[in-house]
């Protein structure tokens, strides 16, 4: 079998190698994340479903790039027949449509995880607001990607009529960077107000800050795209843009998976994640919250001593209500806004009833 070499006029093998390597890395990251979370937290959440969906889109997008390389991508356009060029453009179109939702779901997975970190209403409003922003960004970008050129050939930017694709890519990646900045800033705001050591805060924030590498890849893509988008040989010259896209979606998935690696989870033992898990299980793992406690003793009733000479039944019922102020307790991430505990203690003694001497009812019940 002849060996395919990477040359200046044949960069398809290089694109293939990097694409499959980054895809395998993404799959490994999601698998390790799932195994770690199953071993430590023992629960499957919304964030797990979202990152799995993101991985499926990544697999589809990488497969589309593989179809591109099998049909002339990475080679001079002058050496390719028109039918091969058409197949390459269709595959590139499919890859662009799968790229955007993959990024969206990986971001939503992070937001679903951030939501479990805080019970504070104002923080959750920020999470919901950013979630809506990410979804709106994905919808608008997907719509633009789907209709970048005139129908019935929206994929043919070589011979068709298209809008300003350079401006569209700039919008896509700049807004992608902005949302990544928000995904770093939001958990930083939440975690920095936690009453814990600066070292622990820094170790937690460092993991969220890994999205900086995603932003760096997006900046590289912008640089290459603005330099090469008007190239007369797109099948050969645009290969760095394709690699940057693969790198962005891989790093986005890995940044979400690193939040569930064991060292990070161990740094959250003060209640960030495990507290959320315990709250879902209805268990208690709360401490250090400012609250008010009210103890309400309920009625205690005993049988007439004149009837039996002994207590037939004795009961004690106490209700303890603890009220947490969500705003006062917003700095503590392992708290709940309101807890009501009811504790009942019963003691029962039995004896043979003796009829009252007067044949009537004893009215001296206590």
Image (tube, rainbow, N blue to C red):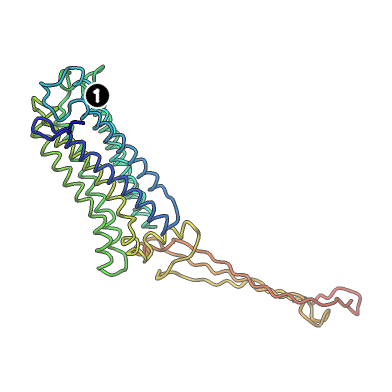
Identified at 46% across, 59% down, the residue is: 279
Where the C terminus falls, by quadrant? Answer: bottom right
Identified at 27% across, 64% down, the residue is: 201
Identified at 89% across, 76% down, the residue is: 355
Residue closer to the observer: 139 or 237: 237
The correct choice, above or below, for 359 with respect to 154 in the image is: below
The correct choice, above or below, for 352 with respect to 179 in the image is: below
The correct choice, above or below, for 330 with respect to 305 in the image is: above
Q: Residue furthest front?
A: 1
Q: Quadrant of residue 86?
A: top left
Q: Quadrant of residue 273?
A: bottom left
Q: Secondary structure at mark 1?
A: helix
Where the N terminus falls, by quadrant? Answer: top left
280 with respect to 74 (left or right): right
- Residue for badge 1: 90
In the rendered picture of this protein, how many numbered marks are placed on residues? Answer: 1
């Amino acid at each position: 079998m002849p060996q395919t070499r990477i040359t200046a006029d044949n960069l398809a093998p290089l694109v293939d190698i990097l694409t499959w390597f980054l895809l395998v890395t993404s799959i490994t990251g999601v698998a390790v994340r799932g195994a770690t979370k199953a071993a430590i937290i023992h629960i499957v959440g919304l964030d797990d479903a979202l990152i799995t969906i993101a991985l499926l889109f990544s697999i589809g997008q990488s497969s589309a790039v593989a179809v591109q390389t099998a049909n002339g991508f990475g080679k001079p356009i002058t050496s390719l027949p028109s039918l091969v060029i058409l197949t390459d453009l269709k595959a590139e179109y499919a890859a662009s449509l799968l790229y955007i939702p993959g990024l969206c779901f990986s971001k939503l997975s992070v937001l679903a995880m951030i939501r479990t970190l805080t019970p504070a209403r104002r923080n959750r409003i920020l999470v919901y607001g950013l979630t809506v922003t990410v979804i709106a960004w994905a919808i608008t970008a997907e719509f633009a990607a789907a209709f970048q050129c005139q129908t019935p050939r929206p994929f043919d930017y070589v011979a068709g009529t298209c809008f300003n694709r350079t401006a569209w890519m700039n919008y896509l990646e700049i807004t992608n960077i902005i949302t990544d900045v928000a995904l770093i800033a939001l958990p930083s705001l939440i975690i920095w107000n936690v009453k814990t050591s600066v070292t622990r805060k820094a170790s937690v924030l460092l993991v969220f800050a890994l999205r900086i590498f995603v932003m760096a890849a997006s900046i590289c893509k912008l640089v290459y795209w603005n330099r090469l988008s008007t190239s007369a040989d797109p099948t050969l010259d645009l290969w760095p843009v394709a690699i940057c896209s693969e790198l962005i979606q891989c790093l986005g998935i890995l940044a979400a998976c690193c939040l569930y690696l064991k060292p990070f989870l161990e740094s959250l033992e003060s209640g960030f994640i495990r507290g959320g898990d315990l709250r879902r299980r209805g268990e208690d793992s709360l401490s250090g919250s400012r609250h008010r406690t009210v103890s309400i003793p309920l009625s205690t009733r005993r049988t007439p001593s004149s009837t039996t000479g002994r207590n037939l039944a004795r009961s004690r019922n106490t209700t303890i209500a603890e009220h947490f102020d969500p705003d006062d307790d917003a700095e503590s991430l392992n708290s709940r806004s309101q807890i009501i505990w009811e504790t009942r203690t019963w003691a029962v003694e039995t004896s043979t009833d003796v009829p009252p001497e007067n044949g009537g009812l004893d009215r001296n019940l206590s």
